[in-house]
Image: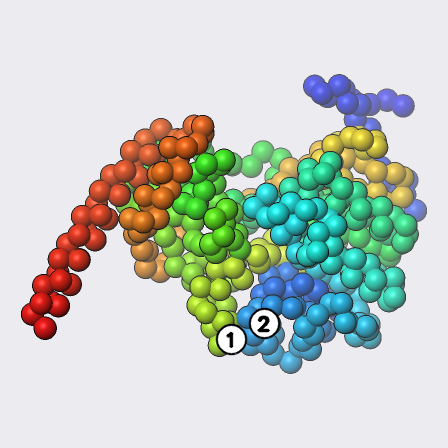
Amino acid sequence: MSGTALGSGALVFPFPRRSLERPEPPPEGWRHRVVGLFSGIGGLERGLHRWDHDTALLCEIDEAAREVLAQRFPGVDLHSDVRTLDHLPSGTTLIAAGFPCQDLSQAGETKGISGARSGLVEQVFRLVQKHETPWVLLENVPFMLQLSGGKAISVLASRFEQLGYKWAYRVVDAMSFGLPQRRRRVFFLASNSGDPRSVLFADEVANPDLLPNDAAGVACGFYWTEGIRGLGWAVNAIPTLKGGSTIGIPSSPAILLTDGRVVTIDIRDAERLQGFPADWTRPAEKVSRKGSRWKLVGNAVSVRAANWIGRRMLTPGSPLDVASAPLRDGNPWPTAACNVGQGRYRVFISEWPVHSKRRPLDSFLRYPLRPLSSRATEGFLKRTEQAKLRFPAGFLDALRGHLDRVSQQDTVSSLILGSHSKAG
């Protein structure tokens, strides 16, 4: 068989699609009836709603997230525990599940797919087998492709193959959709009635305008809770919003502004960076402390990525003629792959389905910024002293300058409070 040699020595075969015998895709304008599992605050569902896919049921165990869902999806049935969900609503055509990532992410405990939380994906298979749902959409962190040799993605692929489903997955970067947040996620789509490539592989920007490496003249985001083993860093963007930190604190990333100030963002801007309207998670404050909103937002699915998938599920496209190669047992799992009836193939496609214009980070932010506290700044700098990391040029000097300024402000504030106290 002829092929094209890549620099890695792999043999690239023609993308196997025209010879496939597969059901015709649903007619244009066909809308899904959706059940959302592990719904969080409804990122997947809000994106699907944009294209009039109908959500019949949402399932979420976190009380604060459930309060958000109750307010933002009025009239939709809510269930609290996927383990006790016995039946899906009649006519369900799509299960959407951003199943727990804590056991799969680098920021989590990395127990893998067998961990107590990420292992709950087995409940998805239980319901799929019981109802033979035609489509299943899963979302998770890209570290699942590497952890334990890719055991998690291997389990997903094998289980769907055993059930007779075609599948495809692709790592997608939320920056593709015009948001100044570096957020890479795996979207895994399986079907027993259609071709998942018509959704995930129908759009590509092959050479996207990636973020510059030069931080001069632009705001840069970083995580002040890190600093020993790594530094979440993004030029003219923030690093991935997350539900927790390496020191166990649900927290905002910090931003080094061009004038040397170091600030943290408002929760409302964090919601906007995920594609939600400002104050989307405010209902959570009825049952939980205000700080819990950071965890809810950090664990959410990017709404704009879900928008793209919702559009393609409504109007499937033709899979692009991109290069592919057989994916052999023991090979590392790539950033995109599929099995639609002719075996597993790695797919050479970018992480950018589209390229929406992205506003600079500092002009995107709308709500008041708060200086990073002297305590947080000092703790971060102490951790960097223990690290063997290379930091961006001028970054630590800027942090030290910021620490001097906020420490002086703290001293002045203390003196003022002291004088008021004596006067009282």
For the residues marked 2 and 1, what is the alpha-carbon distance in whole angstroms? 7 Å
Q: Please give left or right for residue 214 compared with residue 415 in the image.
A: right
Task: Count residues near mark 2 (Cα–Cα under 10 Å), then give few for <14, some for 14-19, many for 20+.
Answer: some
Q: Is residue 50 above or below residue 153?
A: below
Regarding mark 1 in the picture, which secondary structure is present there? loop
Q: Residue at x 80, y 46 (%)?
A: 155
Rendered location of residue 293, percent (x, y): 48, 64
Residue farthest along the right direction in this orientation: 21
Label 1 environment density (alpha carbons within 10 Å; few <14, some 14–19, many ≥20)? few
Q: Is residue 270 visible?
A: yes
Q: Which amino acid type is marked by label 1?
A: Val
* Proximity of marks 2 and 1: CB atoms separated by less than 8 Å: yes
* SS class, disc 2: helix
Q: Nearer the viewer, residue 323 or 139?
A: 139
Question: Disc 2 designates what residue?
Answer: 63
On residue 300, the disc is none
Q: Position of residue 365 (x, y in %)?
A: 38, 54
Residue type at the position of mark 2 = Glu
Q: Is residue 212 above or below residue 377?
A: above
**Residue 195, how many percent across, how many down?**
82, 50
Question: What residue is disc 1 on?
Answer: 287
Q: Nearer the viewer, residue 138 or 403?
A: 403
| Quadrant of the drawing holding the N terminus | top right
Q: Is residue 24 visible?
A: no
Q: Please tell me which residue is depicted at 23% across the width and 48% down the height of the picture.
A: 406
Mark 2 and mark 1 lie on one chain; the one further toward the N terminus is 2
Q: Position of residue 203 (x, y in %)?
A: 67, 45
What residue is rendered at 77% in x and 71% in y?
Answer: 85
Name the side, left or right, on which 244 lies relative to 332. left
